Image (spheres, rainbow, N blue to C red):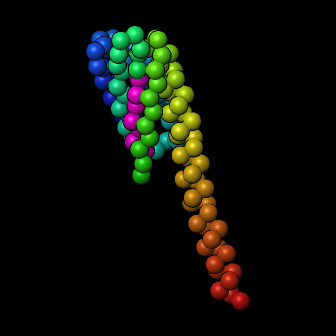
Amino acid sequence: MLINVTGHQIDLTTSLQDYVHEKLQRLERHYAQITQVHVVLNIEKLMHQAEATVHVAGSELFANAEASDMYAAIDQLSAKLDRQIIKHKEKVVDHHHGTQERKHAHDKIDRF
């Protein structure tokens, strides 16, 4: 999984980049077909914003988070992406499982 981190109006320190990589590497625990993650960190007035676009096989997921601290925003972003990836994985698994059930049900109808 390739993780790109971009900063707008913020200096990207190595500790901040390492924290983003550490948090987003955990996403692969739930779904191994993540190809790329693009993270944008931004400071607007007093709010720290983090947003990410996750490219998975056949789809894109997007999440954003705001907090008074950048590390808290990254934590919130990671939690949101975690939930979205789990939901996406369940949809993909259910979709594939559902087509197989319909195919087998169709085979039973043709036999009679």
Residue 18 is at least partly visible in this image:
no
Give the residue furthest to the right.
112
Side of 79 relative to 9 (left or right)? right
Q: Is residue 56 above or below residue 15?
A: below
Q: Is residue 66 above or below residue 63?
A: above
Which residues, given as a range, are shown in magenta?
50-57
Residue 49 is at least partly visible in this image:
yes
Q: Is residue 93 above or below residue 42?
A: below
Residue 68 located within the stretch drawn in magenta? no
Q: Nearer the viewer, residue 49 or 45?
A: 45
Q: Residue 74: horizontal and vertical position, in percent? A: 46, 20
Q: Residue 46: horizontal and vertical position, in percent? A: 40, 10
Q: Quadrant of residue 49?
A: top left
Q: Is residue 110 above or below residue 93?
A: below
Give the quarter of the figure containing the N terminus.
Answer: top left
Give the residue furthest to the front.
45
Q: Which residue does the image show at 47% across and 11% down from the upper left?
A: 68
Main secondary structure type of the part rendered in magenta: strand
